[in-house]
Amino acid sequence: MKDILQNAVKMQHDAVVYCSEYAGHALEIARKALGDSRAVVACGGDGTAHEIANVLAFSDVSLGILPSGSANDFMKSLDHQFARDYPFDAYLRADSVKVDMGRVYAGGKFQRYFLNSLGLGFTGRIARKVSQTNWLKGELTYLNALFSVLLGYKPPKMHIKLITPDTSIEIHEPVFAFSVGNGRVEGGKFRIAPEAEINDGLLDVCILKAVPKAKFITYALKYMRGTQIFDSQVIYSKVREVELELPEPDVMHMDGEVFENIQGKIRVESVPASIKVLC
C-alpha cells in the first residue's frame, strides 16, 4: 500500500506519505502536520480517520479519507451527501466541506470526538470482539462478533436523557443496544441511524430496549434495512445532547475504537461544522 501511495503522489511535490506503526501513531503524525499542511489524508478505516479527526477538529487543516478498512462506515455517509468520483490527483486538490462530529465527556473530563458513531454495551462489546479477531476480514468480522457477543449478553441498566431541539426524554431501564450516529451505518451493513445527516447539527440516537435474545436476529435484519426505527421496542430521536449514567462498567466504542471500563456519568453532544473534510 505504501508503494502504491508513493507512486500516486510522486508528481505532487507538496505531498508526503507516512505509515502509522502502532495505535495512536496516526494521531501523532497528524499533530506534526497541523502547522503547514492543507490536508491530512487517512488511508485506512474508520479508526484511522478517528485518530486524525481528533487532532484536526476546529483547525484549518482538512481531513481526507481513502477508505481501505474493514467497514469504512463514515465514507458511506460522506458519499451519500457529497458524492465524489475523482482520480486521486484531483482528490488531493478537491475543495472541503464542514461536517459535524460528536463530542464525548465522561467523569467530568473531556474524552474524544467521533466522526461516525458511538456505541455502549452490546455494540461496544462487538467492537471489542472485532479488535480481537485476526482470522476474519471485512464485514464478516462484524457478523462473527455479533453472534459471539450475543451468546452471553445481558442488557445493562441505563439511565438516559435525550435532549432534542424541542424537549427531553428520559429512559431508565435495561437497554439491549445503545447507539449514537453522526453517520448512518455501523459495522458495514447495520443502519443504526438511517435518517442521520452529517451536517444537520444533530446526532441520531437509536435505543433498542431489552428484548429476548431469541428475537434479536429479527431485529438484526431490521437494523440492516434501517426499519428498526418503526418498531415499538426502539426509541429513535434526533438530539442535540445525550446524558446517561451507567451503574456498572461497560465497553464503549467510538468509530470502532474500543474504550474499556466506562462507568458513571457520560455526556454526548453534537458539535456542528467542527471539521473540514475533503470531498
Image (cartoon, grey):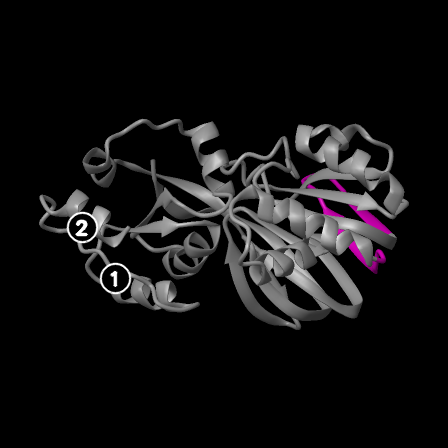
Answer with the quarter of the image where residue 148 lies: bottom right
Q: Quadrant for the C terminus, please.
A: top left
Seen at 53% across and 46% down, the residue is 116
- Coordinates of residue 64 in the picture (x, y in percent): 33, 45
Q: Which residue is mark 2?
A: 6
Instruction: Determine if residue 187 is in view.
Output: no
Residue closer to the observer: 8 or 263? 8
The part of the chain drawn in magenta is 154-171
Q: Is residue 226 magenta?
A: no
**Amino acid under disc 2:** Gln
Seen at 66% across and 72% down, the residue is 107
Instruction: Determine if residue 235 is in view.
Output: yes
Relative to 3, say whether 248 is above or below.
below
Seen at 40% across and 41% down, the residue is 98
Furthest residue to the front? 135
Q: CA distance from mark 1 to mark 2?
A: 18 Å
Q: Is residue 97 left or right of residue 69?
A: left
Please tell me how crowded label 1 is: few (under 14), some (14-19), or many (20+) other residues with Cα within 10 Å: some
The count of marks equals 2
- Mark 2 lies on a secondary structure that is helix
Q: Which residue is mark 1?
A: 33
Q: Is residue 87 left or right of residue 167?
A: left
Q: Which mark is residue 110?
A: none
Relative to 98, say whether 245 is above or below.
below
Q: Is residue 249 left or right of residue 63?
A: right
